[in-house]
Image: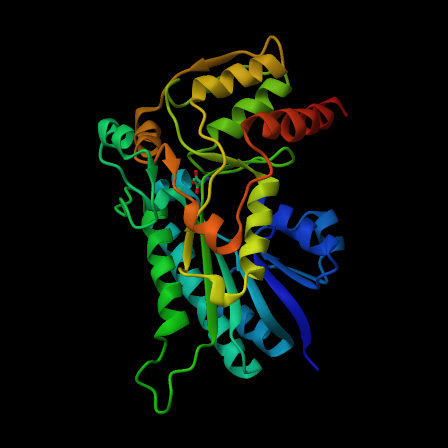
Amino acid sequence: MRKHVVLITGAAGEMGQALVARLAAEGQSLLALDVNPLPEEMRARAQVSMSGDILDERLLSRLVTEFEIPLVYHLAAVLSTRAEYSPEAAHHVNVDGTLALLRLAAEQGSWLGHPVTFVFPSSIAAYGLPDLQTKARAGAVKEHEWNVPTTMYGCNKLYCEHLGHYYARYYRQLAQGPTETHVDFRSIRFPGLISAFTLPTGGTSDYAPEMLHQAAQGRPYACFVREDTRIPFMAMPDAVDALVRLQQAPRESLTADVYNITSFSPTAGELRDRCVRAFPGAQVTFEPDLKRQAIVDSWPADLDDSRARRDWGFRPAFDEARAFDDYLVPNIRARYQA
Ligand code: AKB
């Protein structure tokens, strides 16, 4: 008998660690996979932990033979800043890796006789606004608007959303007999995420968590975007909750494969003010890196998430004040005081 597990790729990343903690607490059997070694406490939470590359075909075939996988959270990715240093390598991980996982899901779905749910985090990086005037005019952007990303990561996320749609609806559409659905693809376009417990690596929205964690440690922080820069953010518990909620939503209530979600949209200057209020004496300066700035300027200031609210009841528990006062500041303070 093959073991029944939920597969989480990118399990050692920021979102992966938070998702593993949440699903393990609910008693789910997890197969945690990451290219980096998994932290000790995570290994204790997952039934099976593996260090390995999603591009390793032999590893993926081993998973198919050893495990029954009705649900995949495919979180592994190279984020927007890191991807620009090595765009082709990022494409390989972000696109070929996703393709390999979709194929695994389709194969599993065909074995199991029902579709495998495939949950995929996409990003605000899937949008590309040409200039600041257009960004100001655009306001809260809807899913179908401004799908012209300027980064490799954004292109990869947008394309993988399309791949998911294809695997869910048209995969092997010319095969004999009726076209069967083996993959139930569901995706969320996330804003920048801020966790109290982990720091991101290689993203361009990283200035917000970096500023806060540096301030809590009494270290000066030179923010790499202008003070008036505005993009949407969300506290990590809301992001993980959204993944789980979307996964659990009845298929018939979903009118789309891809959903925006958001919580609050502060400027970098407003984030600095919150850091200074929480950690008096925090030293935050603004020293824009013009190239990273251009990436953030191409992302919307706000997202229209009415489709997620309507279809699967998305509602963040943490608005800006609650995110800082009840989740981020107390937990970050405790972390660095310990
Ligand atoms: C990044 O900055 O690359 C990510 C994202 C917005 O998806 N945090």
User: Which quarter of the rendered image does ligand 1 occupy?
Assistant: top left
Quadrant of res 137: top left
Q: Is residue 28 visible to the viewer in this orientation of the structure?
A: yes
Q: Which residue lies furthest to the top in this view?
A: 281
- Residue 306 is situated, as x and y percent measured from the top left of the image, at 42, 46
Asked if 301 appears above or below 2 in the picture, the reply is: above
- Residue 315 is situated, as x and y percent measured from the top left of the image, at 54, 43
Q: Residue furthest bottom?
A: 176
Asked if 315 appears above or below 268 in the picture, the reply is: below
Asked if 210 appears above or below 50 in the picture, the reply is: above
Quadrant of res 6: bottom right
Figure colour scheme: rainbow
Report the residue at 45% width, 64% height from top. 185
Q: In the visual, does 259 lie left or right of 42? A: left
Q: In the visual, does 67 lie left or right of 145? A: right
Q: Which residue lies furthest to the front in this view?
A: 310
Report the residue at 53% width, 51% height from top. 313
